[in-house]
Amino acid sequence: MFYDQIIAWTFNLMLFGGDLILLVGLFRSPKIRTALVAGAGLLGGAVLLATILGTDHFFIVRLIAYALFLHLPIVLIASSVILRRSLPKFSVVLMALAGIVAAVAVDAFLVEPHWLTETRTTITSSKVQQPLRVAIIADLQTDEFGDYERDVFRRCLDAKPDIILMAGDYLQIDGNDNWDLLRDQINGHLREIGFSAPLGVYAVQGNIDQSLWVEIFNDLPVNRIQETKAFDSGPVRITGLEVWDSFDRNLEVNDSNKFHIVLGHAPDFALGNVNGDLLVAGHTHGGQVCLPVIGPIMTASQVPRSWANGITKIAENKTLIVSRGIGMERQSAPRLRFLCRPELILVDVVPEQTQVVAK
């Protein structure tokens, strides 16, 4: 972590040097062409430098975020001031761009990461005789347990689900210094609110979870799934996947006469011969950063990009739901979400030709 901090400081100092060179050049030659060429060169150089210095792809994104949300506004505002007399209209455009970048930064870093939404959907099945509500919580992925995280669990219980599915990645911290504290805080809150569901709570392991993740749910009515296992609960069968089985694109899961839910951390298993009515996963965070038209810039999954976020009807009686998750990538990654709000998902499974019964 200390090494990453040194790289980040080095990257920013080098970019500040580039910022200064660009602004001095623009002061000496106040022309639109100078501004555009120099700006494009600086941004391109920043991306190249981030790629060279970055220790992993998340850290590369973090360095690029410095360039976009720290250096770019500084350059735009300073350039606008330099050109306010010689090129007043262009100066206004630059200041407006600086405002847009600042607005995006506020949204991405301060607003969206905790702007939880409830995604509700309904699917029909001939395998159920009564309506059934399923709540999906994925990727809590936090290094602190505060009001936002407490609100997630409260809203989940307020929806009165019959089944609660938890798709892994509960904590993401450096080392073990705060692990015991966070475990106890989450466990204590869940016991305090009576975290349970009539047909059960099912939790699988995520790929960032430590082996002791099961302790988060000590003394709680939660089925903690460490190996691939099936559970029969009333009219439903739930197959929980071992974490690396969820990444297996050739996985095979047998069908069931009951409404069959297959719960994994990553959605890659949906590419296999998995006979389930409802396939549930997280892991992708919906991309965490999405761009207009383009969509998620990365998914960390082998499924088609269109499958990596939201609801996909794979076959007539097979629906895949991939949650955008509750938290976000931490450690070396920038802590942001953009056009990709965190979500609690509620699925109403109803008999064919039956309307949803409000709860």
Image: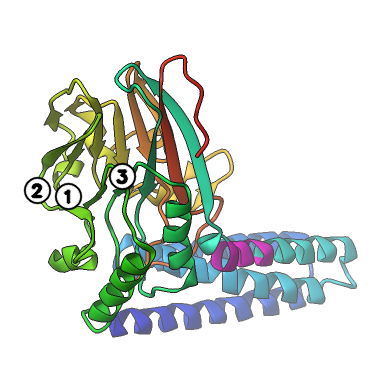
Question: Which mark is drawn over residue 198?
Answer: 3
Amino acid at circle 2: Glu
Locate residue 33, reporting x and y percent. Answer: 73, 59
What amino acid is found at the position of numbered circle 1 in the picture?
Val
- The crowd level at tag 2 (other Cα within 10 Å; few <14, some 14-19, many 20+) is some
The residue tagged 1 is: 243
Which percent across, then down, holds residue 69? 58, 69
Number of dots carrying numbers: 3
> Based on the displayed image, in which of its 4 quarters is residue 218 positioned?
bottom left
Using the image as rendered, state which of residue 336 and residue 243 is in the foreground.
243
Stretch of the chain drawn in magenta = 102-111
Identify the residue at image location x=39%, y=24%.
Answer: 313
Q: Is residue 146 above or below residue 248?
A: below
Circle 2 is placed at which residue position? 227
Q: Quadrant of residue 1?
A: bottom left
Residue 213 % position (x, y): 19, 65
Residue flagged by tag 3: what amino acid is it?
Pro
